[in-house]
């Protein structure tokens, strides 16, 4: 299994390849019904564009995804995922598929909280060890909703990838308050409500919007560490 990530992991940028990176998959989420997570590929671009233009439900539920969704949007997102692999040696973006070689039916990602002098990395309240904290995000094609795929993916992403493979101490999910489908994925992944409502700025809308935050903690002691307002700029 992949080596556990630690809070002190600071590999040199550009020193990794897709072959040497961890958490690339493929991961078997479920065999009945079949569901897999594999690293996103540039070959997924045409299907991403098709799926994300079927309706506005992903656009309406996300702070980032645009509508209409253009090939340039997909190219940019997958390039950022590829750049992150090269910089850190850790894959954090996956395509949901119903066969290992089949087309993308959804997307899952994990973002690690960012720190600087104004926003230092949280530490364990008892041991003082820096904490690894991640936020998950996801979307599923409207052609595949209602089958439990998102719920299965969410639990697997939290339990098997974030907590076990990546060694996260805290995993969070942020959703618009009115987005019940996204909230249910977090709840079924074992997360508890951390904030019921908090307004954050959504650049693509040009206005504030209320979000709620869910979290799961490896050690209950860290429940005293809540998500800061500065951590919301890239979570959805």
Image (cartoon, rainbow, N blue to C red):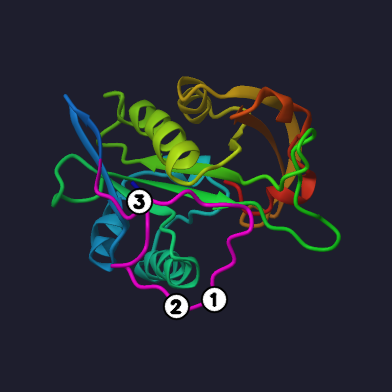
Instruction: Name the residue tied to disc 3.
Output: 94
Front tag of 3 and 2: 2
User: On the picture, is 86 further left or further right than 231?
Assistant: left
Q: What element carries label 2?
A: loop
Disc 1 to disc 3, how far (Cα)?
23 Å
**Tag 3–tag 2 contact (CB < 8 Å):** no
Instruction: Name the residue tied to disc 1.
Output: 12
Residue at image point 54% right, 29% down: 179
Q: What element carries label 1?
A: loop
Of residue 132 and residue 71, the one placed in the foreground of this image is: 132
User: On the picture, is 149 further left or further right than 182?
Assistant: left
Front tag of 1 and 3: 1
Of residue 26 and residue 93, the one placed in the foreground of this image is: 26
User: On the picture, is 208 further left or further right than 71?
Assistant: right
**Tag 1–tag 2 contact (CB < 8 Å):** yes
Instruction: Name the residue tied to disc 2.
Output: 15
Q: Where is residue 58 in the image (x, y as percent from the top left)?
A: 44, 43
């Amino acid at each position: 299994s992949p080596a556990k990530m630690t809070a002190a992991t600071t590999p040199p940028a550009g020193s990794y390849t897709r072959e040497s990176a961890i958490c690339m998959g493929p991961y078997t989420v479920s065999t009945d019904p079949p569901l897999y997570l594999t690293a996103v590929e540039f070959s997924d671009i045409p299907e991403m564009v098709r799926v994300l233009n079927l309706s506005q439900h992903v656009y309406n539920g996300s702070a980032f995804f645009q509508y209409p969704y253009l090939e340039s949007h997909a190219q940019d997102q997958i390039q950022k995922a590829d750049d992150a692999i090269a910089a850190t040696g850790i894959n954090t973006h996956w395509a949901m598929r119903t066969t290992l070689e089949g087309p993308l039916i959804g997307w899952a990602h994990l973002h690690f909280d960012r720190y600087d002098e104004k926003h230092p990395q949280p530490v364990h309240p008892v041991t003082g060890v820096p904490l690894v904290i991640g936020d998950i995000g996801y979307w599923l094609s409207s052609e595949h909703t209602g089958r439990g795929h998102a719920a299965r993916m969410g639990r697997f992403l939290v339990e098997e990838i974030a907590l076990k493979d990546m060694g996260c101490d805290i995993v969070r999910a942020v959703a618009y308050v009115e987005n019940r489908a996204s909230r249910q994925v977090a709840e079924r992944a074992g997360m508890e409500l951390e904030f019921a409502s908090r307004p954050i700025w959504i650049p693509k809308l040009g206005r504030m919007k209320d979000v709620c935050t869910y979290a799961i903690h490896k050690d209950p002691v860290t429940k005293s560490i809540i998500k800061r307002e500065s951590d919301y700029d890239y979570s959805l």
